[in-house]
Image (cartoon, grey):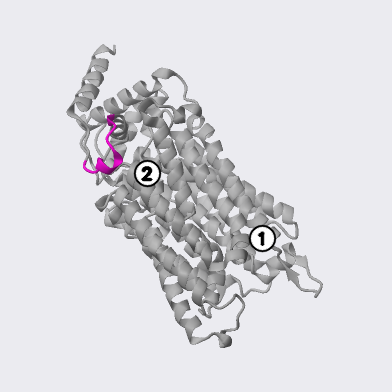
Amino acid sequence: MARDVPTSRRAVLLAIFIAFGEFILVTAILRSLNSSLQEIDTYGDTGFLFGYDMGVISGCLIMPDFIRRFGQEGTDGQYYLSSSRQSIIVSLLSAGTFCGAIAQAFTSDRLGRRGSILFWSAIFTVGVAIQTGTTYSLVQLVIGRYIAGLGVGSLSAIVPLYNGETAPKAIRGTILVIYQVQIISGIFLSYVLELGSHTINNSTSWRLPIGLQMVWGIILLSGIFFLPESPRHLLGTGRGDEARKVVAELNGVPEDDPLVIEIVEELDFAIRAENEGGKATWLECFSTRNALWRRTINGMMLQFIQQLNGQNFYYYYGDTFFQSAGAGLSPYIIQTVLGAVSVFGTLPALYFIEAWGRRKSLLLGAFAQAVCALIVAVVGHTTLAPTGTPTSALTARNRAGGDVVIAFAVFQVFSFGTTWGPTPWVYLGESFPLRVRPKSIALGSATNWFWNFMLSFFSPRIVDRIGPMIMMVFFGMLVFGYIYVYFAIPETKGLTLEEVDELYRSGIPPWRSVGWRPSEKHHHEVHEKGTSDSVEKP
């Protein structure tokens, strides 16, 4: 079995570029590792890029200039954005992300992981430019949102794929969590910028936060040229020499080091075994071979549960919810508070994803969030004043109930960031063999964006009917999520992507998978096969 080199500087920083990219953080990391500042160009952001894109539109919807340009004039002469227009503006991004998540499966193999990231980053940047250049055309705005969504959805699938294939297994979970950290950081920064820009009395109020996304896209487009291709993809396309060079670089050793030889042999054997049946199809993602159907369903179900556990409801409608609770804060401050809580909630996951493992993180997170959702639903339904009630008219009971609602809402957001925010993406990035990996990850990402679209489109209508009791829907989903994880999700912490295959083939029940290790027979077969192939080569 290939030994780990978990402290490989190059592997860590390359993964951080794909998922992270904040200049200050990367500079600090480079300095701590005595690396040259020239390498800063190599590490930018994708998680930050589309986290920012997801968060920026909510503040724009309540900016006066934005409403005047893209809303309707009421009978009283005041402009407003109808619920239908708001739904279209918000949900068109999610519609684009759904299509993009599927489309990337075709580019990941043809253009490679690296080339695919470059292509979809350009698409995203074009979409942002179309939005920023809009004057009064709602059609142009939503087309730009859709095109940007294509890039967001594609990158949301490619990034876990790339990081899962390049990060050393000992820190793969942590690297994939960084991806989620930066998504949340992007959302938070968009809230902070809009907190300052919303007071500007012209189109700069919304053009500035939207247009700034082009800067993130350009950073990614420039830095991506320095990224290596995934070694698994290189071997899968017959470029063994390039693969050996990348493996050596990622592990910080010479190309002739025994570690490189062993890793390449193991990867090559696994890849050729996967490709014996010819080109993979979408239907193969649900085949019984190597329990692929279980892995694909698990990836899709985790994304489905993640979207319907209440987190995004707080993001979209937390301002109204907190105002009813008597918070007395502006929507922009409320958004910023939620974003800050999410960031601080996600940071502990960098440690817990490896210390607890995937299963324990999901189980504890589902339990904690379910308790919070239940309390918010019951207390909110029985104590909160109707929406729109003046602050001066709130009773002591309303205020006391509001304090409880706010406290447990914040704790639920924090719990999500530590557990269900990053873990489904970690699981998605490390669960599939190379043969079907782009397609299976595409299905998982598409599931995420489909339910994101459904939530953003229908939540306002549901809240109008049942108010805070919508949290009971999320409570039920979290109870279901706990049960599903316990009986269906195996522990994959500390395993290589090839060892995950053996885990599923072993047939071990998920609730007994913690501490599972691959058999010695598996390693001997890989080593003997690789040695035999080396001897046969001229």
Whole-percent x, y for residue 157 in the image: 47, 42
- Residue at the spot of label 2: 427
Query: Which residue lies most toward the bottom here?
Result: 392
Label 2 residue SS: helix
- Residue at the spot of label 1: 86
Quadrant location of residue 121?
A: top right
Which stretch is magenta? 506-515
On the question of residue 229 being in view, the answer is no
Question: Is tag 2's residue or tag 1's residue first in the polypeptide sequence?
Answer: 1
Whole-percent x, y for residue 219 in the image: 50, 51
- The kind of residue tagged 2 is Tyr
Q: Determine crowd level at label 1: few under 14, some 14-19, many 20+ residues with C-alpha closer than 10 A.
A: some
Whole-percent x, y for residue 12 in the image: 32, 47
**Which residue does the image show at 32% across and 33% down from the upper left?**
504
Query: Is 148 left, or right, of 350 in this rendering?
Result: right
Instruction: Depth check: give the residue in front, 50 or 516.
Output: 516
Instruction: Depth check: give the residue in front, 190 or 420.
Output: 420
